[in-house]
Amino acid sequence: MKIETLKEIIKKKLSNEQFAVLTNLSNGSSEIFKLGIPISKNFINYKNEIENYYNLKKNGIIDGTEILIQNYIKPVEVIIVGAVHITQYLIEFLKDLNFNVTIVDPREFFITKQKFQNIKITNEWPEEFFKKIATNSNTALITLTHDPKIDEPALKYALKQKFFYIGALGSKKTHEKRCGRLKEDGFNDEEISSILGPIGIKLGGKSAPEIALSIVAQLVYETNKLLLNSKN
Amino acid sequence: MTQSFKNTILEEAISWIESGQQVALATVVETWGSSPFQIGSKMIINGKGNFLGSVSGGCVETSVIAECLELIKNKNSFKKIDFKVSDENAWDVGLACGGEMTVFIEKIN
């Protein structure tokens, strides 16, 4: 592979948009592929097959050819409400996985006192934050403040936008009360049951890193389910 | 494997090259059976045999490194290597999982 191609791939990764790298295994040439960008003569004969694999996000050697396609899939957006202690461990676990993380917390004290490096963090109320960003059903929400006035506007927004993962920290009792309030606000049982609460898979632990691990495990499971379904 | 935007192996390759090292990139391109790593798994190797990343659970790395060192020295710029259990060579490097895989190695230049 040429150094220029390698540098181009690295630059493309910064865009956070889906692209693919094509390699012709019979002559060693490589190039970046994206729908709508012209394909070089090395690969033009396989245009239809390449587009097909790209759309299916399928990786590997295209059947009957010597063309390798490797897809870079747009990372899943994860919004964490609450710059709390658990959040520090969460971002540690999430950093090597294919997620883009944003932390939202209106409490300035929390943001300045907790240590968060190389992470998008915003000091505003969830309502204000959601007005500014584009979300879709491929977005995940994790609420960790267990303060209804901070968590619930975010949960309501996520329910309306049908986020694929909505997890809320809080005991069973806290969660029951939360569900009651959401019902009063007009959300139906099906919507409310899409909130994973108490958040995380059962690991039996109560420390901040253990809770973070249980949340990440659940998020990865749900994300893999989502990616598998989007391929079919 | 879906290429993760967070995996930094290609960035590491660039930093090795910029520090004057010769670098080969190994990528898993085909797998059959129970081979542990997915298509797209990567490893980089320099002229001294130092490496980063992986293409299997440790089964074929030694052999891939040897092939990459050979590639860095000679004129060819790429090679496809098949690791199959039925192959005597694969027994040597020990693809103990019973899987089969093809690794594509290429010089970065």
Image: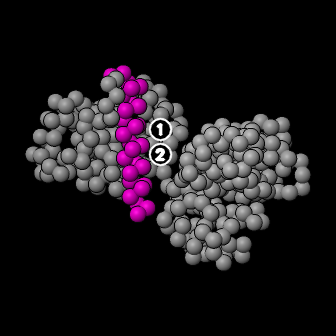
Q: Secondary structure at mark 1?
A: helix
- Rendered-image quadrant of the C terminus of chain A: bottom left
Q: Secondary structure at mark 2?
A: strand
Residue type pointed to by label 1: Leu
Measuring from the top left, give residue A103's x and y in whole percent: 40, 39
Calculate the distance from the C-alpha at mark 1 to the C-alpha at mark 2: 7 Å
User: In the image, which residues are magenta?
Assistant: A206-232
Residue A28 colored in magenta in the image:
no
| Closer to us: B19 or B10 | B10
Asked if the residues shown at circle 1 and circle 2 are in contact, with their CB atoms under 8 angstroms apart, the answer is yes
Q: Residue at x 66, y 78 (%)?
A: A45
Q: Earlier in the sequence, mark 1 or mark 2?
A: 1
Measuring from the top left, give residue B91's x and y in whole percent: 71, 42
| Closer to us: B53 or A170 | B53
- Rendered-image quadrant of the N terminus of chain A: bottom right
Q: Residue at x 12, y 46 (%)?
A: A183
Q: Main secondary structure of the magenta part?
A: helix
Q: Chain of mark 2?
A: A
Using the rendered image, report if marks 1 and 2 lie on a common chain.
yes
Residue matched to label 1: A94
A191 shown above or below B95 = below
Residue A225 colored in magenta in the image:
yes
